[in-house]
Image (cartoon, rainbow, N blue to C red):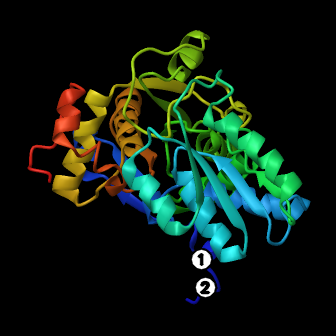
Amino acid sequence: MTYKSMPELIGNTPLIQLKGVSELTGCTILGKAEFLNPGGSVKDRTALGIIREAERDGSLRPGGTIVEGTAGNTGIGLTLIANALGYKSVVVMPQSQSREKIELLDLYGADLRLVQATSYSDPNHYIHTARRLAESLNDSEANGAIWARQFDNTANAKIHQETTGEEIWRQTDGQVDGFICAVGTGGTLAGVSRALKAHNKDIHIGLADPQGSALYNYYTHGELQGEGRSIAEGIGISLITDNLRLAEVDSAHQIADAEALPYIFNLLRNEGLCLGGSSAINIAGAVALARKLGPGHTIVTILCDYGDRYKSKLYNPVFLENMGLPAPDWPVN
């Protein structure tokens, strides 16, 4: 098969059976291999959905600029797609994110603006900074600029409903009992939940929430507050986004890093998959959901991105030991 451009490669990722956790739980646990998208993450879908919707509504003009505040992966997807389609990209990212993602954005040619990591209530938060920058560039750039607005732009959830969720339904021949993932913007969880529930309302939708995020308490106790912290990047929020409002959630599961990290270390050592921290939270969530549903069920989660984007933290024994977290049981240089 021949493709005319890079954006056509986004999506249609395979499902991979995760042997270790499937054997552990007596369920069939499948991971959607979103790391195989051309930008290396599930956020390629979000980026493509936002760009195509902006093209359709006329807000993104030929030669225009796309501005986004991101933990990294959406910025990577937006930059690569912008390069392929003739747009410019400006990425606003907290300087606390991994060195590897910063280097990738530089390599791909993004206009990268690093800002201090602050709380969402701070006007200098990366999301608010991106909004102001987009407004300024829209006035000054000849072809205008848009703010991608991935948290509240429901083109995000829409593309996951139309692609990710429908792919999961087809790939499992409709024999899927549960789906679970963490929330960064809410787009993946919302889109997939709506797609699967439209086919079968009894499919159980779970939320895997890292410590420090407020969503577990929100869905379990009705209170938007979080405790603790997580080293997983790009997931875990303390607000209800417009995308998340569309999600159909049946249960929430709080996942500690100490519980989650051994799953990806074992996956690399025994199954040859090197994945990031959000995948660790998702896999631990799938185990929790499997235990809730019982043996014999088929559960799908998202394998978000490659682990090599986090080598300096996630696979760094010194960093992990300083954080009081489990480390790989083999030397990492």
Q: Are marks 1 and 2 in contact (CB under 8 Å)?
A: yes
Callout 2: 10 Å neighbours few (<14), some, many (20+)? few
Q: Residue 45 carries which label?
A: none
Task: Give the secondary structure at mark 1.
Answer: helix
Looking at the picture, tell me which residue is in the foreground, 108 or 39: 108
Please name the residue shown 50% across and 40% down the image.
234
Where 157 falls versus 58 (above or below)? above
Q: Which amino acid does label 1 sit on?
A: Met
Q: Mark 2 points at which residue?
A: 3
Callout 1: 10 Å neighbours few (<14), some, many (20+)? some
Mark 1 vs mark 2: give the one in front.
Answer: 1
Q: Can residue 34 be seen in this view?
A: yes
Task: Give the secondary structure at mark 2.
Answer: loop
Q: Residue furthest bottom?
A: 2
Q: Is residue 33 visible?
A: no
Looking at the picture, tell me which residue is in the foreground, 172 or 185: 185
Image x and y of residue 172, in percent: 49, 57
Occupied quadrant, residue 205: top right
Please name the residue shown 69% across and 49% down the image.
156
Please name the residue shown 44% across and 38% down the image.
96
Looking at the picture, tell me which residue is in the foreground, 307 or 32: 307
Marks 1 and 2, Cα distance to the nearest angstrom? 8 Å
Q: Which amino acid does label 2 sit on?
A: Tyr
Occupied quadrant, residue 150: top right
- Position of residue 317 in the picture relative to residue 147 (left or right): left
Image x and y of residue 307, in percent: 33, 53
Q: Mark 1 points at which residue?
A: 6
Q: Residue furthest front?
A: 140
Where 227 falls versus 140 (above or below)? above
Figure quadrant of the N terminus? bottom right
Please name the residue shown 53% across and 59% down the image.
173
- Position of residue 172 in the picture relative to residue 126 (left or right): left
